[in-house]
Amino acid sequence: MTSILVLALLLAQQAAPPEKCTLAGTVVDSVTGMPLGKAIVVAERGSGGDDDASTMTDAKGNFVMIDVEPGQYHLAAQRRGYTEGYYGARRASGTGTRSLSRQERRLKILGSNWCRLVLSQAL
């Protein structure tokens, strides 16, 4: 009887949907460090489903995405006059730095997360 109860409890825990997550952060200019308002931020899961999320930064460059499904995402930001920036991307110049592949730029979202995206002005 005890083993049936334990099995029932384990199955009940597995059936519960995963907890939704929150992703927040700031988008800034790569040269000045000043926050960038009206930048579009996209969290793309890449599964082709409805799990992608997007939002726009406020005047202080802040953004928040709530009720995001847990998992790994590609996080990108774009704004007029700037090149698109990716979470985890680094400048190719400079000692010891390298550009990260698309796979390496994946952000694992679990619970509450905060990140910073940096955009460079387009030439």
Image: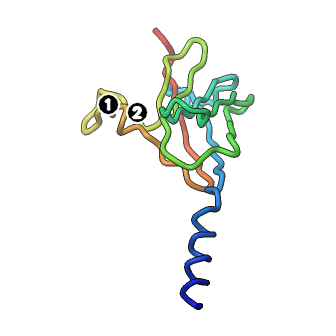
Left or right, 86 with respect to 101, comes to right
At horizontal 64% and vertical 26% (from top left) the residue drawn is 36
At horizontal 60% and vertical 18% (from top left) the residue drawn is 79
Mark 1 lies on a secondary structure that is loop
Query: Extreme top residue here?
Result: 123
Left or right, 118 with respect to 65, comes to left
User: How does the figure colour the protein chain or chains?
Assistant: rainbow
Q: Position of residue 4 (x, y in %)?
A: 57, 83
Say which residue label 1 marks: 99
Q: Is residue 112 above or below residue 117?
A: below
Q: Which three-letter amino acid code belongs to the residue tagged 1?
A: Ser
Q: Marks 1 and 2: in contact by CB < 8 Å? A: yes
Q: Which three-letter amino acid code belongs to the residue tagged 2?
A: Ala
Q: Is residue 122 above or below residue 21?
A: above
Q: Nearer the viewer, residue 123 or 105?
A: 105
Say which residue label 2 marks: 89
Q: Position of residue 48 (x, y in %)?
A: 52, 29
> Is tag 2's residue or tag 1's residue first in the polypeptide sequence?
2
